[in-house]
Amino acid sequence: MTRKKKRKGSSNKIPKLTSTILSILKKERNKTFNYKQIASKLGVNDASSRNQIIKKLTQLKAKQEIEEVDRGKYKAIVNTEYHVGIFDAASRGNGYVICDDFEDDIYIASNNVNKALNGDEVELYVYKRRKKGKLEGEITSIIKRAKSEYVGVIQIHDKKNYAFVVPDSNKMYKDIFVPINKINKAEDGDKVLVSLEDWPDKSDSPNGKVLQVLGKPGEHNTEIHSILAEYGLPHEFAHEVEAYANNIDTSINEEEIAKRRDMRKDLTFTIDPKDAKDFDDALSFTVLENGLYEVGIHIADVSHYLKEGTVLDDEAYERATSVYLVDRVVPMLPEILSNNACSLRPHEEKFTFSAVFHLNDKAEIKKEWFGRTVTYSDARFAYEEAQAIIERNTVIPSQAGISSIDTTIPLEVSLTGKAYKTTPEIAYSVLKLDQLAKIMRGKRMRSGAISFDKVEVKFNLDEDANPTGVFFKTSKEANKLIEEFMLLANRKVSEFIGKQKPEKTFVYRVHDEPDESKLEALQGVVSKFGHQLNFKSKGTISSSLNKLLIDVQGKKEQNLVDTLAIRTMSKAEYTTKNIGHYGLAFEHYSHFTSPIRRYPDVMAHRLLQRYLDGEKSANAEIYEEKCKHSSNMEYLATKAERDSIKYMQIRFMQDHQDEEFLGVISGVTDWGIYVEIISNKCEGMVRTRDIKDDYYEFDQEQFALVGRESQNRYQLGDEVIVKVKQADLVKRHLDFDLIGKAEVEQ
């Protein structure tokens, strides 16, 4: 009898079979596997290999390392506790996971990242580092990618028939492989938008394809479009959206007027920035026979034109906000609405949604009304023009003495409106509104509101969007006048709905109390400048924060302290779950006053009208999802706006590379010091290795770099002289050479 020949390789032992099976089961621990599925994962299909797998499964079950949940189906027994968090990547591929289950962030070494990218929601298990005893973790799976599109420069390897995109973001630690047939006509060195397609198990880099060629790096439009693309923000409307908007009936017809409160005869005007192109709010002012003041806050009735279920509404929702870059606005709504039909331009009738109040001389509300209106704007003021009236007429005349107002003042300040009701009437209205606003602001501050009047950096641009100068925008009485009445409308609308029984679904703008650890960190910084915070109670925290913000005004540390104080605050967000607004000291607060540029305001208008019509409460889950989307889009827009400012600052500094600048040290790390130039707020880095007069070490407790031999120190808040070393537009990074410390005046 002849013996059958063994198949070649059939008796081969599968290496590391125990660890391999456990790895497969633990990686997908919520699934069950039979021996065939495991064999498939291992890439084997012969009888000997299958028998080895069956035998090993039986042994692991006996050792209670795996369990048989159904006949022939196995699952890992997991003793490790798993957690969920957000991965914050570093440029070298390592990073941290921010996890609610732990007070400290969890360090992830580069070999334990397992293809997670910055911002991804991940699952991880945590253990203590052997040497330092600190928490470290390993990412076991990616729950949700934060993004799938990246901006970068393409490098094409013609001979090898492929390309790589080198991402702009230093948070993206891997280049993206692109096959030559997916480069979308890009040329070597182009700035492109690339989409991640997959990331094979054995591949070092993810695979992608070029979606769009943005242009040549360093060119102005290329860099601005790159900023928008990096955050997934569009820079133009699709044709069908524009076409739909252009076909909307924007006429002010009698049929619609009849459904509204007619306030066209009330004195009404707008106060906006001098370069504003859309005016979504106006104020009306009337002195009533009973001595009270009727003040109307009139908001463009965007929801009249923006109908749910249309392509236009879908687009507005997806955008959720207008984006304000240094040289342009990317609007939420097409121009036919944002700059025309919904813009409360002077000497035009408009459909509006209004909050109307009767106030006494103490700014106490005696009556309120909400609803749809039709209004007529008598005049348009720039903030500067309204401010001139306030500054020149500091004494409020009585109603009887209205004719005593210096009527030449408004003429001298060059009002934008050409024809409006009597100049004394408008001047009196502005002055009285300013008086009422100051009373309301005083009440807010005494209730615990925090006053963040952070300086805004603005640029003078030439016709080609080149920065020719830098100036700072500060908030004066005219700005605060408008702010207070917008806050009043936002607060009272949300109160009106929030206090109804049974409870109604609404879109709130909430702001939680500050994080205690961040407040302690702020105290550590401001104490270096001689300031103190009081943590005794909620009231003392807000009052001491306000005192701090007042005390630093005009001082070298002002911008640093303002920035750090804002960072201690929780992030404001949209939600249907009202917890109040800590920063404003309001129990109820919403966004109602800017529907041209914010989708949550549109939702607030729709819900208010729904409840005024007596309809039942809207679906909370649907609106909560819309709130989350709106908060996320607001966050991305804010990041894009900051990036555009940084980009323009670097462009500005490119033309001033031979100059020396006085700056203040705004940050200290072990790799260098950050310096903010006092005259223009441009911030750059002096790298530790470039300070040649000594070997400098980082003193974390003192926020300083200290020379090992000389004990010379560069500390947070010190004034120094710097010069531009490198201004990199593409990476949006500014490097300084340190000339030395500034001489301190005696």
Image (cartoon, grey):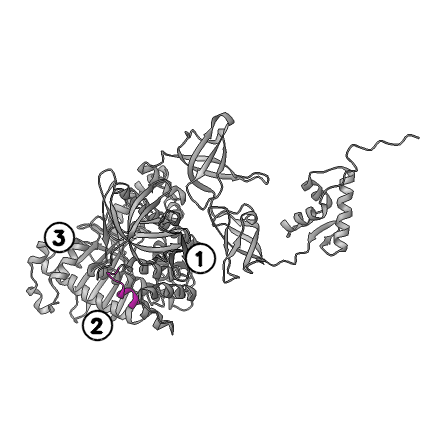
What residue is shown with label 2? 362
What is the quadrant of the C terminus in the image?
A: bottom left
- Which of marks 2 and 1 precedes in the sequence? 2
Identify whether 546 is placed above or below 15: below
Residue density around tag 3, few if under 14, some if 14–19, many if 20 or more, within 10 Å:
some
**Which residue is more in the foreground, 579 or 442?**
442
What residue is shown with label 3? 415
On the rendered structure, is 599 left or right of 437?
right
Regarding mark 2 in the picture, which secondary structure is present there? loop
Residue density around tag 2, few if under 14, some if 14–19, many if 20 or more, within 10 Å:
few
Residue 388 image point, x, y percent: 14, 58
Mark 3–mark 2 distance (CA, rounded to whole Å): 29 Å
On the rendered structure, is 582 left or right of 350?
right
The overriding secondary structure of the stretch rendered in magenta is helix
Quarter of the view holding residue 3: top right
Q: Amino acid at mark 2?
A: Lys
What residue occupies the far front of the structure in this picture?
709
Magenta-colored span: 546-555
Q: Is residue 360 magenta?
A: no
Residue 375 visible in the current orientation: yes
What residue is shown with label 1? 624
Residue 382 image point, x, y percent: 18, 53
